[in-house]
Image: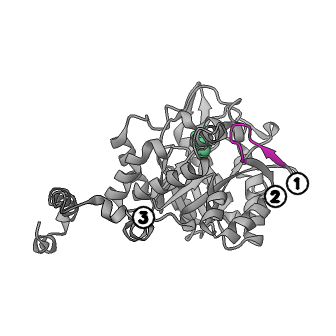
Amino acid sequence: MAFSSLEKSPVTCQKFETDRIKEISVTQAPFPLARHRRTRASAALRNLTREVELSVNDLIWPVFLRDGEGVCEPVASMPGVNRLSLDLVVKAAQEAEALGIPAICLFPYTDPALKTEDCAEAWNPKNLTNRAIGAIKKTAPNIAVMTDIALDPYNINGHDGYVRDGEIINDETVEALVKMALAQAEAGADILGPSDMMDGRIRAIRSALEGANHRNVTIMSYAAKFASSYYGPFRDAVGASGALKGDKKTYQIDPANRNEALACVERDLMEGADMVMVKPGQPYLDIARAVKDRFGAPTYAYQVSGEYAMIEAAAANGWIDGEKVMLESLMCFRRAGCDGVLTYFAPRVAAILQG
Ligand code: PBG
């Protein structure tokens, strides 16, 4: 398609891109005029022709918080990942900041005694997460603090929303999520991450933030979050596995559904999300690519606990080179169109990338 027709009608832009890619693949010179191995022949040529890069700026580090002091408690199903008490989380944030990691994301392991049906601990200004936000902002001011918005760490039922007669109640849950969001914004969070998959929560949170003068607090919506079995180790880490009755299929997306995922992303962007996330990551790279192509918004993927555990387990058995697979897996998120990745590997990768 000629450039002039693109100028005339901006709506053909998308089509132009598609046509151009098709043209490239059919206008390739035949062998031996084209030899793809020429540009692969040396590191210099490979470096020169590489299409995407992985940088420390692409990393968001999820960390698990617990109460106490000086506590570093390994998560059995996630070798190398620990639950940290507040003092150690602050230290970890300082180290991450020094490595140039742009954001850290907090997930609390909640004392079972604090879990209730009304989940009130979720918006307690002095809860573990909110105290950690304040402490990190004070000592590591250049790292963005991201939070999780969902009721599961505080819910006696282990679900992301209120449960009544076996049903997850949408609208009342959204009201609770708004309180949780405001408490986190008040504590100083930079990025709020609603991971609950209730309908209408982004609009409700966004208007509450505007109303409370938190105009620059960003929302990274877990917009395309699937009802996945890859979250198992995470639920161990936050102590939700034991509490969870049933599954999350009435609110998280069926792994078979791509159109529904795109509709959810569009909805969340229209409701005021600044950034959108696809989760899990590697098995859902087609969704990430579609989101980036269609909406062009800042797009992230979550390399979830099960993905991490699989790489670690195979590496521990000597079946794969763990470090190489870690780096390759993260590069592939970039190739799929992601602007960044939430990954438990963040500090390890950052240390490698920083030499
Ligand atoms: C909770 C939440 C989950 C994860 C992030 N936030 C688990 C779930 O939805 O059950 C999963 C992260 C991971 O597996 O690493 N709303």
Point out which mark residue 313 bears: none
For the record, the magenta segment spans 72-81
Kind of residue sitting beneath label 1: Gly
The C terminus appears in which quarter of the rendering?
Answer: bottom right
Q: CA distance from mark 1 to mark 2?
A: 6 Å
How far across and down, in percent of the image, does residue 145 sit? 65, 63
Q: Residue at x 14, y 60 (%)?
A: 27
Dividing the picture into quadrants, the one containing residue 29 is bottom left
Residue 22: in magenta span: no
Kind of residue sitting beneath label 3: Val
Q: Choose the circle earlier in sequence order: 1 or 3.
A: 3
Crowding near pointer 1: few (<14 within 10 Å), some, many (20+)?
few
Kind of residue sitting beneath label 2: Leu
Q: Choose the circle earlier in sequence order: 1 or 2.
A: 1
Q: Residue at x 56, y 37 (%)?
A: 230
How far across and down, in percent of the image, does residue 154 sit? 71, 41
Crowding near pointer 3: few (<14 within 10 Å), some, many (20+)?
few
How far across and down, in percent of the image, does residue 177 sit? 60, 49
Residue 76: in magenta span: yes
Which residue carries the number 2 mark? 88
Asked whether residue 282 appears in the rendered view, the answer is: yes
Q: Secondary structure at mark 1?
A: loop
Which residue carries the number 1 mark? 70
Q: Secondary structure at mark 2?
A: helix
How far across and down, in percent of the image, does residue 85 sit? 82, 53
Frontmost residue, 120 versus 128: 128
Which residue carries the number 3 mark? 52
Between label 3 and label 2, give the one nearer the viewer. Answer: 3
Specify how the rendered protein is coloured: one colour
Q: Secondary structure at mark 3?
A: loop
Q: Choose the circle earlier in sequence order: 3 or 2.
A: 3
